[in-house]
Image: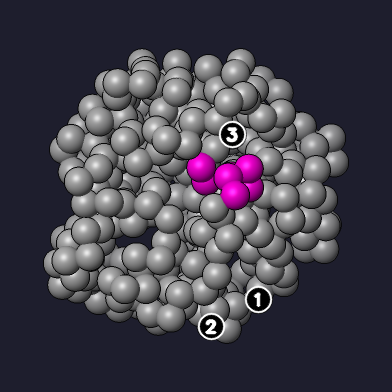
Amino acid sequence: MKSRFVEGVNGLTMHVLEAGTPGRPCVLLLHGFPELAYSWRKVIPALADAGYHVLAPDLRGYGRTGGDGEVTSYRMLNLVQDCVALLSLLQIDRCHVVGHDFGSPLAAYCALTRPDVFRSVVLMSAPFGGPPAKPTDPQIHADLAALGRKHYQWYYSTPEADADMRRCPQGLHAFLRAYYHVKSADWPGNKPHPLASWSARELAKLPTYYVMRLEENMAQTVAPHLPARAPAWLTDEELAVYADAFESNGFQGGLNWYRCATSAEHSAPLRALAGRTIDVPSMYVAGAADWGIYQKPGDFERMQTGACTRMLGCHLVPGAGHWVQQEQPAKVNTLLLDFLRGI
């Protein structure tokens, strides 16, 4: 596995982790928030050893790629263009794409809008229920506030979110340790189940790291859940890679993804795609203890019954929460290789 920089990627110089032989079938790995290309460190070698050419970029706004301050550049379809431009510069015509967390909808829109480039898609954690037909009704926020709660994605869209996390009293390392812990299978409170509807009373059943207490920021939300010791799946040395990156660059680049996703204006191009489906072969993988499966009620079901017309597998991995490819890499690698070989 090597680190390289690719210049001229849709206005960026993109940092990429790479393994395997160019010219072999390519797999593009897209990370989520708050993560990096490094999040795929346990997947890249297994795919390369199996004969694939593997690329894992630090996406726009993250790590050693960075990004600009123009929020519109973080719109979803421009993020798709980042991926297409990277492949084009490397002279790769076709590839498989795998996305985790916020990388999952990015992978979905890659496959939906450019099936000529992306020959299959694997979605991890965040199900894809199809492009939205209309903006989110703002009444949901008033209804949540009446219950003393607020949705984390709209909190992440606020100007103060970056400093709340980057300059939190407990320190960035402790914040990230608690954040990764509380969303993992190690936290006993993660017992996900479907929600009946996108309503305040149903959403309030989600843990507070998804639907937060109204008076708390994210650093305050996760602080009580700091574990006594580091788990084997994320050592202190590994965590330091994330902490150093976000200490250097902050969270704002990643938070701009949320600013675009929650904005009716910035998400308007996605609504123009309403009704379109993903027609390339697809698979879904999540940790069995991941609330992300159900955070958007109905998407898990819509993904399997209509949004993805060639869904070849839907897998909930025991012993894993949100960070499935880090918590249970051997199981994830087996699922990925079985899927890819089948195609």
Look at the image and name its color scheme. Answer: one colour
Specify the amino acid type for callout 1.
Answer: Arg
- The secondary structure that dominates the magenta segment is loop
Secondary structure at badge 3 equals helix
Mark pair 2, 1: CA separation: 9 Å
Image: 137 above or below 90: below
Sequence-first disc among 2 and 3? 3
Q: Give yes or no for contact between labels 2 and 1 (Cβ–Cβ under 8 Å).
A: no
Q: Which residue is mark 2?
A: 306
Choose mark 2 or mark 1, whichever is in front.
2
* Separation of residues labelled 2 and 3 (CA atoms): 30 Å
Q: Which residue is mark 3?
A: 39
For the magenta stretch, what is the residue range? 182-188
Q: Secondary structure at mark 1?
A: loop
Which residue occupies 53% across, 83% down?
Answer: 306
Disc 2 crowd rating (10 Å Cα; few below 14, some 14-19, many 20+) is: some
172 and 130: which one is in front? 172
Q: Is residue 185 magenta?
A: yes
On screen, residue 302 versus residue 28, left or right, reads left
x and y percentages locating residue 299 in the rendered image: 47, 73
